[in-house]
């Protein structure tokens, strides 16, 4: 069992909803990012998705895109992200949370997939989400990452057929990322009515834990989902970025999720 | 189902949420497009609405000066002023027959936007055009034309506010509107099946040219030259000649000002392989894989990527891709205006400029065809600033 799957299963066994915050590397500033990351780790995140910035993020809405462009202007690169993570592991040991990188294919491709997989493993990365790498193009890269213990997380959504989900399930590890809505990140602040169907299909196709993202900002949104299809983990990105950008603290953002 | 590779280039690098509409389109391409109903309707639209077939004009005056025979394929005479309408009518008709009720498209210079808006109006479909905020200002007459044709024009304020950002915005819009909307992609790039679909609709240019040359000269041309931005006019012109190995094919990229390290729009000559907008192709990018801003005096060539089939044709040596600067383009533009009384688009002027700049390589008596992909009326503002006029 992959470490990400194990992490979620154990938290679930303890009766908790697994928390997966997303934060763009170098956000809100290069200087404050390492400290913010430490706080997110300490406050109780189970998995942290760190965004690798890209100039043309087609699956993201305005909040993540703006964060991404700001990070690029501040000089954030994949190399610096991996160096920073490796430094943290070497000086203070691993984070409590498991580290997943989320970014578009081209920066990884230019770094070199083989070299990336090796360096990411050394930096303590155990998962990778590449939104512009669908099943059809993923075979080689999935294999390269797997050799270094890194799960390529599959994304499915409201328009993914059960048949196609099963094709994903046959090769997937870690968890499955369910996109709640036909849209980009952060473009809505509530879950759409069809999310029940999407979750039901996902449960049918996958035995992996299910993480729900796109449009989550408060735990009360999960409470209304029927228990048999309730996701195992909640992913939130845009709402966290907005909160931090407005000067809010990590502790305040997480309070409603933790007290649950 | 395949992933649309041309050698090592192409593919379908898009979010999972866009796979279903792209596969639906691929299916429509194999089921609807070859059918007699579709072909008859498209043929009628191209003839009686767009104005095909377009003439192949012999340049009497220039040919005398140059010492070889220069021909122009007159896509500039088409409805809305450029080759773009070949593609938008095809895609709009296909979308209509797929049961879609709306079109979305990106546009840079506005030519594809205008052609899409016209095609949507003709097909009684809704139309939304995404255009970089910078381009909305630079190309305001085309914004007015799109609006007059009934399209909604959305100014894209993100990223570099140009064509690549308009494509990002249109792809995002398509994720949420895919049930009712077809993405009428403007060039032979993007994710599979767009490079093949757009080539399919633009190949009418090369097919007609081939027939017209045989009819007028009794043989195939020696050289065929076209400008390359995303590369739809060029692939449409080249494709029917690919197997004719005696025909030299030349694509012309925009070198910008031509100074070392200047912004340009020449990924085939100055770029490296990478993934952008759904396909693996050659791109202007930095060492970290971030896409660089592009530049050309011609807004229609101003794009940091290129269609994957061009990257392939370059890699196997079938097509030679040359470079032309902004100032060479302006000279070529003026030469054609004065010599033949034709006002070419700045995009097409790049192809002409390559011929003029390299005329010493061309043997006397050669038959040379340039694809005059569009007319220059849209460029008057840019030309007014660039060329001193009395």
Image: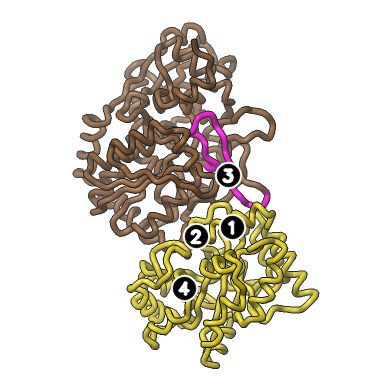
Q: Secondary structure at mark 4?
A: loop
Q: Which residue is denoted by mark 3 in the rendering?
A: B283
Q: Are marks 1 and 2 in contact (CB under 8 Å)?
A: yes
The residue that appears at 68% across and 66% down in the rendered structure is: A33
Q: Nearer the viewer, residue B322 or A213?
A: A213
Q: Which residue is denoted by mark 1 in the rendering?
A: A68
Which is in the foreground here, disc 2 or disc 3? 2
- Quarter occupied by residue A71: bottom right
Q: Is residue B298 magenta?
A: yes
- Mark 2 or mark 4, earlier in chain: 2
Q: Which residue is denoted by mark 4 in the rendering?
A: A216
What count of labels does the image hold?
Answer: 4
The answer to whether residue B359 is left or right of residue A197 is right
- Residue B323: x and y in percent read 58, 28
Which residue appears farthest toward the bottom when viewing the image? Answer: A14
Distance, label 3 to label 1, CA atoms, is 20 Å
Of all chains, the one bearing label 4 is A
Distance, label 1 to label 2, CA atoms, is 10 Å
Distance, label 1 to label 4, CA atoms, is 20 Å
**Which stretch did the figure color magenta?**
B287-305
Q: Which residue is denoted by mark 2 in the rendering?
A: A60
User: Chain B's shade in the image?
Assistant: brown
The answer to whether residue B251 is left or right of residue A145 is left
Q: Secondary structure at mark 3?
A: strand
The answer to whether residue B49 is left or right of residue B112 is left
Q: Secondary structure at mark 2?
A: loop
Q: Are marks 3 and 1 in contact (CB under 8 Å)?
A: no
- Mark 1 or mark 4, earlier in chain: 1
Check the image and report above or below for B184 versus A123.
above
User: What crowding class fits label 3: few (fewer than 14 Cα within 10 Å), some (14-19), or many (20 or more)?
Assistant: many
């Amino acid at each position: 069992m992959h470490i990400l799957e194990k992490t979620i299963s154990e938290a679930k066994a303890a009766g908790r909803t697994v928390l997966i915050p997303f934060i763009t590397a170098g956000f809100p500033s290069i200087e404050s990012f390492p400290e913010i990351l430490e706080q997110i780790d300490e406050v109780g995140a189970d998995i942290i998705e760190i965004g690798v910035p890209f100039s043309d993020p087609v699956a993201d809405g305005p909040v993540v895109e703006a964060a991404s462009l700001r990070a690029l202007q501040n000089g954030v690169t994949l190399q610096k992200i991996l160096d920073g993570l490796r430094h943290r592991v070497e000086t203070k040991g691993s984070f409590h949370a498991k580290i997943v990188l989320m970014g578009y294919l081209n920066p990884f491709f230019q770094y070199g997939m083989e070299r990336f997989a090796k360096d990411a493993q050394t930096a303590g990365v155990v998962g990778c989400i590449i939104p512009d790498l669908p099943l059809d193009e993923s075979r080689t890269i999935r294999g390269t990452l797997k050799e270094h213990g890194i799960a390529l997380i599959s994304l499915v959504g409201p328009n993914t057929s059960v048949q196609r989900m099963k094709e994903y399930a046959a090769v997937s590890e870690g968890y499955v990322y369910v996109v709640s809505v036909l849209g980009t990140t952060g473009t809505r602040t509530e879950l759409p009515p069809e999310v029940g169907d999407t979750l039901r299909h996902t449960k049918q196709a996958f035995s992996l834990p299910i993480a729900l993202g796109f449009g989550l900002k408060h735990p009360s949104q999960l409470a209304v989902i029927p228990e048999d299809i309730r996701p195992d983990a909640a992913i939130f990105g845009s709402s966290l970025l907005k909160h931090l950008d407005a000067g809010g603290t990590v502790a305040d953002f997480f309070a409603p999720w933790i007290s649950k | 189902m395949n992933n649309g590779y041309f050698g090592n280039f192409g593919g379908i690098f898009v979010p999972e949420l866009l796979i279903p509409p792209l596969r639906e389109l691929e299916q429509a391409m194999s089921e609807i497009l070859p059918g007699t109903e579709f072909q008859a309707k498209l043929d009628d639209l191209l003839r009686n609405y767009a104005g095909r077939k377009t003439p192949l004009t012999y340049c009497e005056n220039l040919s005398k000066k140059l010492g070889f025979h220069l021909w122009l394929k007159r896509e500039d005479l088409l409805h809305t002023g450029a080759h773009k309408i070949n593609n938008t009518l095809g895609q709009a008709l296909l979308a209509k027959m797929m049961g879609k009720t709306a079109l979305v498209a990106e546009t840079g210079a506005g030519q594809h936007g205008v052609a899409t808006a016209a095609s949507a109006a003709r097909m009684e479909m809704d139309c939304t055009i995404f255009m970089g905020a910078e381009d909305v200002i630079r190309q305001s007459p085309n914004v007015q034309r799109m609006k007059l044709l009934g399209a909604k024009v959305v100014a894209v304020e993100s990223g570099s506010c140009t064509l690549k950002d308009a494509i990002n915005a249109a792809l995002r819009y398509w994720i949420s509107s895919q049930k009712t909307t077809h993405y009428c992609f403007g060039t032979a790039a993007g994710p599979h099946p767009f490079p093949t679909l757009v080539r399919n609709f633009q190949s009418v240019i090369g097919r007609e040219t081939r027939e017209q040359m045989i009819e007028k000269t009794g043989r195939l041309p020696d050289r065929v030259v076209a400008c390359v931005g995303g590369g739809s006019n060029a692939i449409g012109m080249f494709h029917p000649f690919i197997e004719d190995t005696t025909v030299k094919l030349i694509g012309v990229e925009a070198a910008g000002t031509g100074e070392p390290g200047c912004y340009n729009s020449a990924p085939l000559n100055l770029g490296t392989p990478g993934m952008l907008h759904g396909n693996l192709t050659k791109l202007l990018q930095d060492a970290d894989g971030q896409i660089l801003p592009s530049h050309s005096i011609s807004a229609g060539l101003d794009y940091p990527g290129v269609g994957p089939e061009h990257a392939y044709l370059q890699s196997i040596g079938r097509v030679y891709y040359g470079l032309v600067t902004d100032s060479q383009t302006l000279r070529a533009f003026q030469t054609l205006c004065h010599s033949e009384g034709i006002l070419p688009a700045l995009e097409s002027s790049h192809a002409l400029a390559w011929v003029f700049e390299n005329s010493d390589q061309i043997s006397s008596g050669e038959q040379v065809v340039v694809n005059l992909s569009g007319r220059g009326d849209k460029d008057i503002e840019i030309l007014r600033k660039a060329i001193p006029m009395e």
